[in-house]
């Protein structure tokens, strides 16, 4: 009996991909956007401390694309520089985005996760 269990264990694939694991989030360039925030909306959420220092930055949020293209369930993700507030600023902008039903590659967007990335620059 011990040999049988050992053979069974050895026959199992070690690094088999998990069929239930979700796909990687879509990137901004993968999605065809119907709407996005305006320059005025971007300016309103620009972190004040970064404005005062005249610092640019980048923030990201992870969101789920709904059937109507709205983004929901968004959470602040990464930002540069760290602790700058750019990820929270991006989170405030997510209601202004709307995705089209298909990616640029023709795949459905509904139900997919997307990483929304916004680069913040002060006007010169």
Image (tube, grey):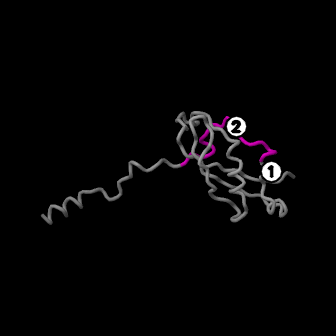
Task: Determine the secondary structure under disc 2.
Answer: strand
Q: Looking at the picture, how far across and down is residue 58, in whole percent?
A: 71, 56
Q: Which residue is mark 2?
A: 35
Say which residue appears at 74% left-offset and 58% top-offset.
57
| Front disc: 2 or 1 | 1
Query: Would you say the residues marked 2 and 1 are in contact, meaning their CB atoms lie under 8 Å apart?
Result: no
- Residue at the farthest left position: 1
Q: Is residue 86 above or below residue 23?
A: below
Q: What distance separates the C-alpha of mark 2 from that of mark 1?
A: 18 Å
Q: Looking at the picture, how far across and down is residue 91, in whole percent?
A: 68, 52
Q: Which residue is mark 1?
A: 44
Q: Which mark is residue 3?
A: none
Left or right: 50 in relation to 21: right
Query: What is the quadrant of residue 30 in the picture?
Result: top right
What is the crowding at mark 1: few (fewer than 14 residues within 10 Å), some, or many (at least 20)?
few
Say which residue appears at 61% left-offset and 37% top-offset.
69
- Residue at the farthest right position: 124
Task: Determine the secondary structure under disc 1.
Answer: helix
Q: Which residues are magenta?
A: 25-41
Please say whether residue 35 is one of the residues in the magenta stretch. yes
Please say whether residue 84 is one of the residues in the magenta stretch. no
What is the crowding at mark 2: few (fewer than 14 residues within 10 Å), some, or many (at least 20)?
some
Query: What is the quadrant of residue 97 in the picture?
Result: top right
Say which residue appears at 77% left-offset and 48% top-offset.
42
Q: Quadrant of the N terminus?
A: bottom left
């Amino acid at each position: 009996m011990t040999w049988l269990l050992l053979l069974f264990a050895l026959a199992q694939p070690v690094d088999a991909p998990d069929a239930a694991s979700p796909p990687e989030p879509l990137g901004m360039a993968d999605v065809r956007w119907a709407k996005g925030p305006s320059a005025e909306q971007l300016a309103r959420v620009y972190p004040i401390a970064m404005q005062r220092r005249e610092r640019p930055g980048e923030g990201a949020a992870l969101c789920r694309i709904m059937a109507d293209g709205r983004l929901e369930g968004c959470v602040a993700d990464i930002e540069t520089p760290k602790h700058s507030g750019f990820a929270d600023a991006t989170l405030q902008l997510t209601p202004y985005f709307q995705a089209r039903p298909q990616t640029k590659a023709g795949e459905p967007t509904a139900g997919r996760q997307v990483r929304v990335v916004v680069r913040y620059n002060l006007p010169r």
